[in-house]
Image (cartoon, rainbow, N blue to C red):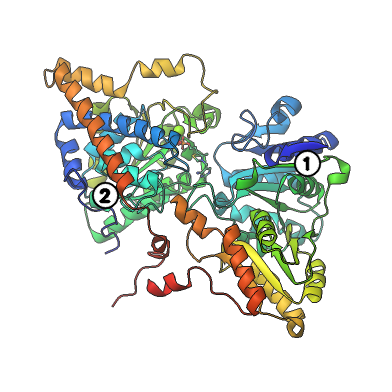
Amino acid sequence: MAIGEGPGSVTTYDAKTPLRRREEVIADPRARLERMMEIRHAEQKIRELHEEGLAWGSTHSCDGQEAVAVGIAAAVPPTDHVVGAHRGHGLGLAMGLTPEQLLGETLGRSVGAVEGLGGSPHLVETSVGLVFTVTLMGAGIPIVAGLALAAQVQGSDRVAVAVFGDGAVNIGAFHEGLNLAALWRLPAVFIIENNHYGEFSRYDRTTTVEPPARRAEAYGLPWTLVDGQDVDAVIEAVGTAVATARSGGGPTLLELRTYRYFGHSRSDRAPYRPEGELEAWRARDPIRILGDRLVADGVVDEADLAAMEERCRERVEAAAAHALAAPVTDVTAMFRHVYPEAAP
Amino acid sequence: MARLRMNQAIGRALADAMDEDPTVVVFGEDVAAAGGVFKTSVGLLEAFGPDRVRDTPISEMAIVGAAVGAAMGGLRPVAEIMFADFFGVALDQVVTQGALVHYLTRGAVTVPMVVRSSVGAGRGFAATHSRTVEEWFLSAPGLKLVEVSGARTAYGLLRAAIREDGPVVVLEPRALYGSREEFEPGEDAVLALGRAEVRRPGDEATVVAVGQTVGIADRAIEELGASVELIDLLSLRPWDVDTVLESVARTGRLALVEEHPFTGGWGPDVASRVGQELFGDLAAPILRITAPDVPVPFARELEFRYLPSVEYVASQLRTWLDTGKLPAPWWADIREGV
Ligand SMILES: Cc1ncc(C[n+]2csc(CCOP(=O)(O)OP(=O)(O)O)c2C)c(N)n1
Ligand SMILES: [Mg+2]
């Protein structure tokens, strides 16, 4: 068994397992809305922990991109394999990772997703299929081809999904990985999370093809450009691609258009944004879009929305308190899992 | 005199080189409009224009490959790889192409390129963004490798590397970008590749350090109050065998302070060479003070345990000077308990 239980596969303070959290997101639009709110609260909390000097190191917030994360988590069953990228707080929480695992990782605590050894860009939760997160651009693309190859060879109906940024489409791994996946008709889905910037560069200043997903044509693959602010559109597109892959139809390249509200990392104040761009995107906030829709459909009312916000705030506060009370990761941890234990 | 942070000194070296030689060009990820993620190329785009100063896509293989080709074609490119860990996706172009062009054209073609990159732990960037990766280049004939230790050496070695007619990789300890040093930039500040510098003289022992461990070793020796000679190796390929051998022949002892894990890195080569040449003259075993053989951990407490600290280096040196025997590394007991 190559993918086993990770260190974080534990029940946390609110007694909900990552798998339970994932099932909620798959089943219920209200849970999806609440999870998007939770992601927003968690990002805010992480900024506070950094400002208070409690957290350190590199961290990448995904405010504004919540519908991408939650839409993928809702459309992909937890038995499929997903490899994410560095801006992965949202995808992690959406897939089921608990706020405590995220904040614990951010704080370098033993309760972190990978015991505080990787930092918040390295979230993993194997019990819900988040099998790895890469921090070198595009590295996950050929890895996902390989995960899909394993499923193909094993005769399993599992699908493998790569989630990566617009900045990753210009690295060799993207082209090599897509070609291989197309050639072998692997059960894989490749998702460009186009938040318009790779570090300080707008995607259209580093890529000549518009939209970048059109690159799929070079490999004979289907592609779709999707509104990444609308969680239902994301679910629809990802669901279709996953179903195609599962039924032997081969890989698809999706581009989910979204926007990051904050800088690339903590120190970046994003001076390179054209005036008005941020405001225009904030006007299409993914949490508001889904909230308005659910209110219009009579699924929730304003009081429900307020209660959801309050629950998220409390859950994230409790998670932060719990993570802060947890022990700092022990020095011996860095020596474990460098190699697999020898078989007995 | 100028009092510059190391990142400013690098920017100054690039500007001076571009002033001096119109074939010098600079490119890399976010180096132009933003002036580099570590602010090492601020103002170059404004001063030298978009022809000579360019932002690239996130394409390390293309960045280094284009530097190889541009150098073959008559330019002196200075390419930037943001974190040295990213050399992994460009290594073919560095060690199998760039380093071998001159040899495989029997001298007809030269590759006067420089690739700069940031290295090292201590900033919370964790396992994939913290290594020093010297060993990736040490086994590459045709390539030169230097690692700077502050603003002055960053300026001097970068200027020298740009003038070199073959490929040079320049490693810059990330933790030092903000540290200031006073020196006079200009012709006299250009250093020679292949030369070490004696940081402090002494006769009880020789300590060799590289990059950010130079400052750490210096403070450790200060704390000890012993007469220990400190050598900043600066050039790792080729390294200054004469300066090191002369020192150790005099002091009879050699200790190395290495940021990287015990296995690999620049230390083993220096240790074995000194051991071979001065076998009978050594008063104590060669001491290598390194990080443990594990990936760089994220948690702050762990990362600073992983890195050799001033206190740890001082205590290792103290035991070794007092007893003439090798002290156990800090992780010896932990390893047994795992
Ligand atoms: C191979 C590689 N090159 C460069 C980097 C440095 N880097 C980290 S994040 C980033 C920008 C990535 O942009 P994008 O893929 O759009 O993802 P986003 O940050 O927008 O989520 C860069 C260049 C890296 N991690 N890996
Ligand atoms: Mg992006």
Three-letter code, disc 1 = Glu
Q: For residue A212, which numbered disc appears in the image?
A: none
Quadrant assignment for the N terminus of chain B: top right
Instruction: Ligand 2: give its quadrant.
Output: top left
- Check chain identity for marks 1 and 2: say if they share one: no
Q: Identify the mark at residue A129; answer none if there is no mark.
A: 2
Verify CB contact (< 8 Å) between mark 1 and mark 2.
no
Kindly identify which numbered label has been placed on residue B182.
1
Residue at image position (49%, 52%) is B128
Which quarter of the figure has residue B335?
bottom left
Q: Is residue B92 left or right of residue A23?
A: right
Pinpoint residue A220: horizontal percent, then vertical percent. 39, 40
SS of the residue under disc 1: strand
Question: Height in image: B259 above or below B160?
Answer: below
Residue furthest to the left: A298
Q: Specify the quadrant of the image occupied by residue B208.
A: bottom right
Answer whether residue A38 is visible to the viewer in this image: yes
Between A103 and B144, the one lying in front of the other is A103
Amino acid tagged 2 = Gly
Tell which subunit mark 1 falls on. B
Find residue A235 and report its horizontal and vertical position in percent: 24, 32
Secondary-structure class at tag 2: loop
Q: Is residue A170 left or right of residue A282?
A: right
B291 above or below B86?
Answer: below
Chain letter of disc 2 in the image = A
Q: Position of residue A293 (x, y in %)?
A: 20, 19
Left or right position of B67 against A106: right
Which residue is at the front of the view, A254 or A235? A235
Q: Give the Cα distance between marks 1 and 2.
A: 53 Å
